[in-house]
Image (cartoon, rainbow, N blue to C red):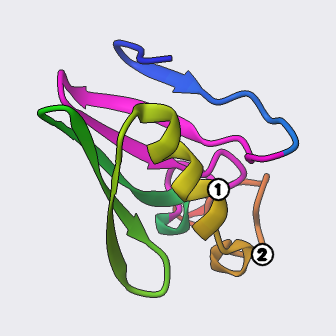
Amino acid sequence: MIADSTAQTAPDSTTDSVTLVRLSPTEWRVSDPRASAHDAASLLGFIEARGGSFEVTVLNQGVASYTASDLDGALALFASKRDSRRLSPNVGGTSRSAMR
């Protein structure tokens, strides 16, 4: 599951698909692939490996922090906290900045 650059969780009955980008050997950015990478709403949060656990920062109408025992558990937090209202009306289309 941990990739050097980008990985995507497989959609199943319990989680939605998210994009996981490795920023360093111990840090990942989590994004919503339904939004343009240029749309701030695509950023869901961050995961950082610390010792034997994963510190999770979820951006959803504020900032919340959680701890998970493994990477899959950390990703599950994003599925349970994701708010589709954050997405702009142009989801799946061109970003507003690219239209200029």
Quadrant housing the C terminus? bottom right
Q: Looking at the picture, does residue 93 appear above or below residue 20?
A: below
Q: Amino acid at mark 1?
A: Ala
Q: Is residue 29 magenta?
A: yes
Query: Which residue sits at x=51%, y=49%?
Result: 31
Where is residue 46? Give x, y as percent.
33, 51
Q: Spot the residue most to the bottom.
A: 61
Q: Could one spot residue 98 in this view of the protein? A: no
**Dot in front, 1 or 2:** 1
Q: Spot the residue most to the right.
A: 13
Query: Which residue sits at x=49%, y=77%?
Result: 60
Which one is earlier in the sequence, the residue at label 1 or at label 2?
1
Tag 1: Cα neighbours inside 10 Å, few (<14), some, or many (≥20)?
some
Q: Looking at the picture, does residue 41 appear above or below residue 10?
A: below
Where is residue 21? Give x, y as percent.
40, 31
Report whether 73 appears left or right of 68.
right
Where is residue 87? Give x, y as percent.
67, 72
Label 2 sits on a secondary structure element that is loop
Q: Nearer the viewer, residue 92 or 16?
A: 16
Report whether 14 appears left or right of 21.
right
Q: Nearer the viewer, residue 37 or 6?
A: 6
Residue tagged 1: 79
Q: What segment carries the magenta color?
A: 14-39
Where is residue 29? Give x, y as percent.
36, 44
When asked about the image quadrant of residue 10, the answer is top right
Query: Which residue sits at x=63%, y=77%?
Result: 86
Q: Amino acid at mark 2?
A: Pro
Q: Is residue 69 magenta?
A: no
Residue tagged 2: 89
Task: Report the Cα–Cα distance between label 1 and label 2.
Answer: 20 Å
Q: Looking at the picture, does residue 95 appear above or below residue 9?
A: below
